[in-house]
Image: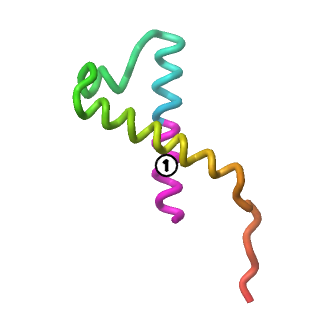
Amino acid sequence: MRTFDAIALILVVIGAINWGLIGFFRYDLVASIFGDFSGLTRTIYALVGIAGLYAISFFGRDREPRETK
C-alpha cells in the first residue's frame, strides 16, 4: 500500500502546483502540456481528483511505527 500512497501523494502535489499556478498566474500547466480539455487532460484531472479523495484517508491513519514481535 505504500506505493499507492506515494503515487496518490505525487498526484495531489501535481494538482496543488497546478491550482497554485492557476490562482496566481492564470496559467493551467496541465492543459498547456496535454491540450485544452483533451482526453488525456481530462484523465489527468480525474486521477488527481481521485488521489485527493484518497489522500483524505491519510488523516485517519496511525503515524507511529508499529513494533514487530
Tell me, yes or no, whether the highlighted magenta stretch contains residue 15: no
Q: Which residue is mark 1?
A: 8
Q: Is residue 43 above or below residue 65?
A: above
Indicate left or right for 38 with 61 as reference: left
Q: Main secondary structure of the magenta part?
A: helix
Q: Is residue 19 above or below residue 62?
A: above
Numbered circles on residues, count = 1
Percent coordinates x, y for residue 30 in the rendering: 35, 26
Indicate left or right for 64 with 6 as reference: right
Please name the residue shown 50% across and 23% down the image: 19
- In the image, 48 versus 6, the foreground residue is 48
| Colour logic | rainbow
Q: Is residue 63 above or below residue 15?
A: below
Q: Is residue 1 above or below residue 37?
A: below
- In the image, 63 versus 46, the foreground residue is 46
Q: Element under label 1?
A: helix
Q: Quadrant of residue 31?
A: top left
Please name the residue shown 31% across and 37% down the image: 43
Percent coordinates x, y for residue 17 in the rendering: 50, 28
Residue at the bottom extreme of this rendering: 69
User: What amino acid does circle 1 point to?
Assistant: Ala
Tell me, yes or no, whether the highlighted magenta stretch contains residue 12: yes
Percent coordinates x, y for residue 50 in the rendering: 46, 43
Percent coordinates x, y for residue 69 in the rendering: 74, 89
Question: Which stretch is magenta?
Answer: 1-13
Q: Residues within 10 Å of mark 1 (few under 14, many from 20)?
A: many
Please name the residue shown 23% across and 26% down the image: 38
Please name the residue shown 73% across and 60% down the image: 63
